[in-house]
Image (cartoon, rainbow, N blue to C red):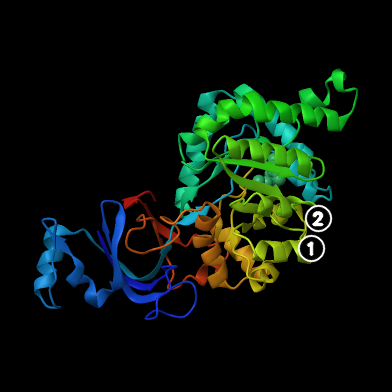
Amino acid sequence: MLLTGIAELVTNNPAPDRDGGALGIVRDAAVLVEDGRITWVGTAAHAGEHLSRDGEREDRREGDEHRAIWDADVELVDVGGRAVIPGFVDSHTHLVFGGDRADEFAARMAGQRYAAGGIRSTVAATRAATDDELRARLAGFVTELHAQGTTTFEIKSGYGLSVADEQRLVRLAREVTDEVTFLGAHVVPFEYREDPAFDGDAAEAADAYVDLVIGEMLTACAPHARWVDAFCERGAFTPEQSRRVLEAGHAAGLGVRVHGNQLGPGEGVRLAVDLDAASVDHCTFLSDADVATLAASNTVATLLPGVEFSTRQPYPDARRLIDAGVTVALASDCNPGSSFTSSMPFCIAVAVRDMGMTPAEAVWASTAGGAAALRRTDVGTIRPGARADLVLLDAPSHVHLAYRPGVPLVSRVWKDGAAVA
Ligand code: NIG
Ligand code: FE
């Protein structure tokens, strides 16, 4: 397939002959796709020189000859002067769950505060759902993601919180993505908190639950997962408990990611950097020391604008992080409690409007930034060798994603070179 007529191509692959800035913009561009991968990127005028016929690479000068080559061998897609960007990489979702919490959202908008304790009501609904019910729901979300331009997405467990249920969730997630995260340490489940054996001692109940998470539960879940995560926050797990979970997960071969600094200041960032986590997510309440620690690390700060939108908390300060040299990603955190949006364009619009990001920074953060947060180099960029995950916008430039909030600008989507929306 040869995409031509691209008024603005966002490559995330800066080169001297391209527009300044990290987006590596090519104007009047063309992209050649073969067997699901990008094989060539350049200006439309030079496209003909890079086409192959019968497996052989042609090297011809511009001229009428090229038209014959295109017609014979290649599906030509002229996008009519619109913008093409890399597929969004949503590095943080919780998409396997039962029920919803619309009533909790409505109560919050009427003045109630967000409390992560609502997670337990989703745990009850998830445990009550059958595999097929969860699978059907998940399939709906995948369609929803693709339609909005997301071509790579991570999914966490964390609404099972028993060995059998957590294993069920990672197994179901693995059916739709390679980026599966074991989040047994989401909250302490009801049956531990209420167990009379702990006599109301929440810390003891949490320690006992962590024993389960790093023992039998990890053994059951690790084969289906790539990552381990822990919710390091007051009301969930202490830094010590989180560290036990993350170190055990790492020893079982999983990469580390952390939920931290969401509801208040805390140790999440320090713990994440100490363990060389790929990402620490939320980062809403950061000290200057946290920002400096992140800037000197390989850990991405993943910001989740949907959460602050839906919980009426203050937004994280992306500007402060970027100015300090921190790598920032944007993700949806799609879940039924704190952020029930799967829309990366929505996250971009909010991040630009309320978190101090430029449109270019927000687009980078939701593509290349998400890829960095998943330690991936094959997605989030349009360059030879990368996966052909492409989004055609019904707009002349990436700026419109923030400039036209709420407008469905994603017009066509290819994943591994195949049309998915
Ligand atoms: O990322 N922070 C913890 N977990 C989710 C919230 C899940 C819920 O409220 O159901 C989050 O925001
Ligand atoms: Fe989350």
Nearest the viewer among 353 and 249 is 249
Q: Nearer the viewer, residue 387 or 418?
A: 387
- Asked if labels 2 and 1 touch by Cβ distance under 8 angstroms, the answer is yes
Q: For the residue labelled by badge 2, is the local secondary structure a helix, a strand or a loop? A: loop
Q: Is mark 1 within 8 Å of ligand 1?
A: no
Question: Do we see residue 336 in this rendering?
Answer: no
Q: Amino acid at mark 1?
A: Ser
Name which residue lies at 31% across and 55% down. Answer: 37
Q: Position of residue 384 (x, y in %)?
A: 32, 62
Percent of width and height locating residue 197: 86, 18
Secondary structure type for disc 1: loop
Q: Is residue 31 left or right of residue 242?
A: left
Amino acid type shown at disc 2: Pro
Q: Is residue 264 left or right of residue 8?
A: right
Q: Is residue 23 above or below residue 225?
A: below
- x and y, in percent, of residue 280 in the image: 65, 53
Say the numbered circle drawn on residue 287: 1
Residue 87 is left or right of residue 71, and the answer is right
When asked about the image quadrant of residue 251, the answer is: top right
Q: Indicate the position of residue 300 as horizontal and vertical percent values.
A: 60, 58
In this view, 182 is above or below 13: above
Residue at the (77%, 51%) spot, across then down: 267
Q: Quadrant of residue 191?
A: top right
Q: CA distance from mark 1 to mark 2?
A: 7 Å
The residue nearer to you, when weighing 168 against 274, is 274
Picture disc at residue 265:
2
| Label 2: how many Cα within 10 Å (few below 14, some 14–19, many 20+) | some
- Outermost residue, top side: 197
Q: At 87% from the left edge and 18% from the top edge, which residue is drawn?
A: 196
For residue 1, above or below residue 227: below
